[in-house]
Amino acid sequence: GLFRYTKGYVRDAENLRIPSTGKHALDSLFFYQQYLTVSPSILPSTTLSDSCYSAMFYNCRLMETVPELPARNLSPYCYHTMFQQCYSITRSPDLNASTLPIGAYGSMFWGCKNLQYIKCMATNNPISGT
């Protein structure tokens, strides 16, 4: 990721504008940014590529805000581990996709021990195919 080896000095990304994404485009962008508290306010892409936001905020333990995720057309593993170990998150963004490809939301909030709210609109189970 772009900020992966900056030793955690990114603190606020609220005004960062993230463009449309290609495969793995923003994978691990803020990986281990231990001082990041504010995420971009929105990730505006509405159609996602494989693994495009995978591990984007992985281990950003102080991050309290999460971006709005308006995408409804997801790809495999697009949000996989996106917020893994972000301990300070208490509320997820609304997850608006009605159909999930395999791994799209997989481990998205793993280790988010303070998470209290998730709204997921999906009506299928990509594991069973129903």
Image (cartoon, rainbow, N blue to C red):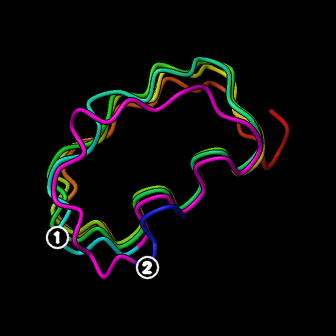
Question: Which residues are the magenta region?
Answer: 6-31
Image coordinates for residue 20, horizontal then vertical, percent = 61, 26
Mark 2: give few (<14), some (14-19) or many (20+) Cα within 10 Å.
few
Image coordinates for residue 58, horizontal then vertical, percent = 42, 67
Query: Residue at coordinates 23% horizontally, 70% vertically from top-left?
Result: 113
Q: Which mark is in front, 1 or 2?
A: 2
Indicate whether 11 appears above or below 118: below
- Give SS at disc 2: loop
Amino acid type, callout 2: Tyr
Image coordinates for residue 122, horizontal then vertical, percent = 58, 27
Query: Residue at coordinates 58% horizontally, 49% vertically from top-left?
Result: 26
Amino acid type, callout 1: Tyr
Residue 30 on the magenta span: yes
Q: Seen in the image, is 8 located left or right of residue 46?
A: left
Query: Residue at coordinates 32% horizontally, 40% vertically from top-left?
Result: 118
Residues at discs 1 and 2 in contact (Cβ within 8 Å): no
Identify the residue position indicated by label 2 in the image.
Answer: 5
N-terminal of the pair, mark 1 or mark 2, is: 2
Identify the residue position indicated by label 1 in the image.
Answer: 35
Query: Which label sits on residue 120?
Result: none
Residue 90 on the magenta span: no
The answer to whether residue 77 of the structure is visible from this angle is no
The quadrant of the image that shows the N terminus is bottom right
